[in-house]
Amino acid sequence: MTIFALGVNHKTASVSLREQVAFSPEQLHQALPALREQTGVAEAVILSTCNRTELYCHGATSADMLIGWLAGYHRIPLEQLREHCYTYEDGAAIEHLMAVASGLDSLVLGEPQILGQVKQAYQFARNQASVGTVLERLFQSTFRVAKTVRSETKVGENAVSVAFAAVNLARQIFAELPESRVLLVGAGDTAELVAQHLTEHGVKQLMVANRTLGRASAVAERFQGQAHTLGELPELLPQADIVISSTASPLPIIGKGLVEQALKTRKRQPILFIDLAVPRDIEEQVNALDDAFLYTVDDLQGIITENLRNREEAAAEAKIIIAEHSEAFTAWIRQLDHVDVIRDFRQRTEQMAEEQLLRARNQLAAGKSADDVLGEFAQRLTKQFLHQPTRMMREAGAAGDFETLAVFQKLIADDE
C-alpha cells in the first residue's frame, strides 16, 4: 500500500491554473467522496488554498490515476495539468506534507497560516470518514513535526515581507504596541496587509486616511478602525504614535513642516514614520527632526534580506527534523505492511489446515483406518503448503532470480 501526494502550487503553475484546480468548501463535500470512489484509493485528504491544491492519498493507486481524476473533475486538459503538477510517493510524499505544514514550501518561507489550513483539510476529511489508520497517523505526526520546527528553529521568527517588517519594527520601538495609536496613510493592498498584522498584534486604535473615503472606509471597517481623507492629515498626525504610509502619490504628501507642527501639538512626544511607498510619501528632511524617526522601504529591505537569510538557515535545520520524522513514519508503514503479510500468511495456512482436517475427520467417520487417515493428512497438507513456494523457486531458477532463491535458501538454513 502506498502514500501519494499530487499537487499544483505557486512554484509550478500560474494563478489562472491554480484557480481552475482549486476546490471551494462546497465542492469538497462532493469531491472527496468522488476521489475515494476511485480504484485503489483507501484514504484521502484534499488541501486547497490560494497558493496550492494537493491530494494526499493512501492505497493501491497510481499517480497517473490521480492526475486523471483531478483533470477530469475540473475539466482541464490532462496534458496541461500534467505539465504543471508534481507527484511524490511514500517517503518523498511524507516529507513533502511535513515541509508544507512547517511553512517550508510556502510563498513566504516560514509563514504560519498554512499549518492551520492543513489542519482544516485533515479535519474536514476526517469528518467525511475519509481518513483511516495510515493518514490519521501521518497527519498527527505532521502536526507534531510542524510544532517541533516552530519551537526548535527560527524559521518563522523573522519578517520577510515589507508589511510584516514594518509592524515588526514598530513592535521593537513600541514595547506596548497594542496601546499605540496607528495612522495608515493609503488603503491599498500593502496598507491592508499592514492593518492585518497590526490587528494580529493587538492594535485597537487604527486610523486609515486615503484619497477616496470609500476605500478608507472599506479597510477601516474590516479592522474596526476610523476612516479619513488625506485632507485631514494635519489633524490626524498629532494623534498618531506610528504613521505607516503606502500611497501611489508621485510626490511626498507628508512634509517636514506638517510633522514639525504635529510634534509641537504633541508636546514633543515622538512619532515613528515608516514610508513603504515608491516614490516616497514622506519628505526625507523629516528624519532631521529630533522627535521624528523615519524609516523607508530601503531600510526595511536590508532587514528583510538578513531575515530571509536567517530563515533559510533555519529551514535547513527544519529539513533535518523532517527527515528524521519521515524515516520514523516510513519504518512504521513498513512494519504495518509486515504485520499484514504475517496475518495473511497465517490465515492462509490455517485455512489449509482446516480444509485437510475436515477431510480427515470425514474419512475417520467413514471408517477408514486412523493410520491411513493421519498419513494422508500429513502428505496432503505438506504438498498443499509447499506447492506455491516450490513453484516460485522453479520460476526464480529459470529466470536467474538469485535474490529470491537466496531468500528461500536462508529460510531453509534458519529452519535447520
Image (tube, rainbow, N blue to C red):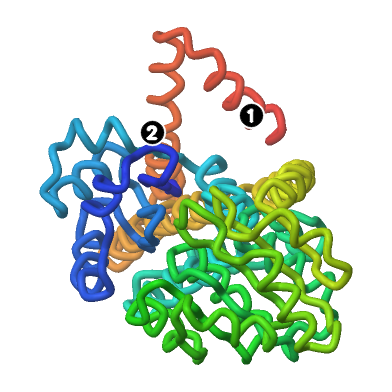
Front-most of 293 and 410? Answer: 293
**Measured from the top left, where is residue 215 in percent x and y?**
36, 76
Can you tell which mark lies on residue 412?
Answer: 1
Q: What residue is shown at x 72% (from left), y 81% (from top)?
A: 262
Q: Residues within 10 Å of mark 2 (few under 14, many from 20)?
A: few
The residue sitting at the right extreme is: 290
Q: What residue is shown at x 54% (from left), y 71% (from top)?
A: 185
Front-most of 23 and 336? Answer: 23
* Lateral position of residue 308 relative to residue 91, left or right: right
Report the amino acid beneath label 2. His
Q: Residues within 10 Å of mark 1 (few under 14, many from 20)?
A: few
* Lateral position of residue 176 relative to residue 142, left or right: right
> Quarter of the image holding residue 336?
bottom right
Report the amino acid beneath label 1. Ile
Q: CA distance from mark 1 to mark 2?
A: 16 Å
Identify the secondary structure beneath mark 1: helix
Identify the secondary structure beneath mark 2: helix
**Measured from the top left, where is residue 187 in percent x and y?**
45, 71
Q: What residue is shown at x 20% (from left), y 69% (from top)?
A: 27
* Lateral position of residue 118 relative to residue 162, left or right: left
Residue underneath mark 2: 387
Front-most of 63 and 194? Answer: 194
